[in-house]
Image (cartoon, grey):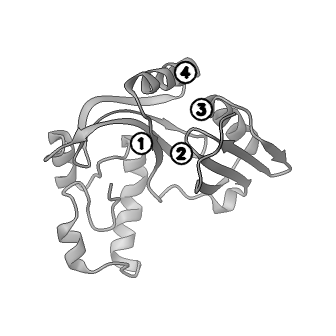
Amino acid sequence: MQTAVFPRMHVSLYVSNLAATVSFYDAFFRQPAAKIRPGYAKYVLDQPSLIISFVENADRVQSHFGHLGFQVETVAELDERLTAARAAGLVQREEVGTSCCYAKQDKFWVNDPDGVEWEVYYFHEDAEFNDPRYQAEAAGSSQCCIAPAAQALLAPLAEEALTTAPMAFQLDTVAACAPCCSPGGVCC
């Protein structure tokens, strides 16, 4: 193992089936969990520098927070991770040379057993526009940087948030947000 980079991020997610989650993340992270206890598993990753834990509690599983992801350093590393994810049958979607969130990227997406989406991407350069596909989706209330399966799940939640959730930002912030974002939606 390499020396961990600090500070490093910690994420904890609720899951409905710990065994299925561990099986998925062993394949996706390409290493076994550092700790497994009844109803709990933890991975300590060096690349990306992350501690992620999973707590089995089906009643608390929520999929409307957006997505998780990490940027890789080289195209070769992206290709290596993509090859491993393909071999494990995890890849949901691939994008090459897309301009999402005003950045030219190559990426792929995976979904864990509870629908949590992960984006693994290589950043080429900033872009002055979003891919026209994302512009068209934004007009139809979809969000960029979200795989289609999650968009279908999020649509009713976004509508409910518009009418019931307190605002965490000024309305003028929404106008300044990238066109791929929508009120109640997910900004990149």
In front: label 1 or label 4: 4
Q: Are marks 3 and 4 in contact (CB under 8 Å)?
A: no
Q: What distance separates the C-alpha of mark 1 from that of mark 2? A: 9 Å
Q: What distance separates the C-alpha of mark 2 from that of mark 4? A: 20 Å
Q: What distance separates the C-alpha of mark 1 from that of mark 4? A: 22 Å
Q: Are marks 1 and 2 in contact (CB under 8 Å)?
A: yes
Q: Quadrant of the C terminus?
A: bottom left
Q: What distance separates the C-alpha of mark 3 from that of mark 2? A: 14 Å
* First in sequence: mark 2 vs mark 4: 4
Secondary structure type for disc 3: helix
Question: In the image, 69: left or right of 87?
Answer: left
Tell me which residue sits at (55%, 17%) in the image.
Answer: 87
Residue beneath disc 4: 84
The crowd level at tag 2 (other Cα within 10 Å; few <14, some 14-19, many 20+) is some
Disc ID at residue 115? 2
What's the amino acid at mark 2?
Gly
Secondary structure type for disc 1: helix
Disc ID at residue 149? 1
Disc ID at residue 181? none
* First in sequence: mark 1 vs mark 4: 4
127 relative to 124, above or below: below
The crowd level at tag 3 (other Cα within 10 Å; few <14, some 14-19, many 20+) is many
* First in sequence: mark 3 vs mark 4: 3
Question: In the image, 132: left or right of 187?
Answer: left
The crowd level at tag 1 (other Cα within 10 Å; few <14, some 14-19, many 20+) is few
The number of numbered badges drawn on the structure is 4
What's the amino acid at mark 3?
Phe
Residue beneath disc 3: 28
Q: What distance separates the C-alpha of mark 3 from that of mark 1? A: 19 Å
Question: In the image, 165: left or right of 21?
Answer: left
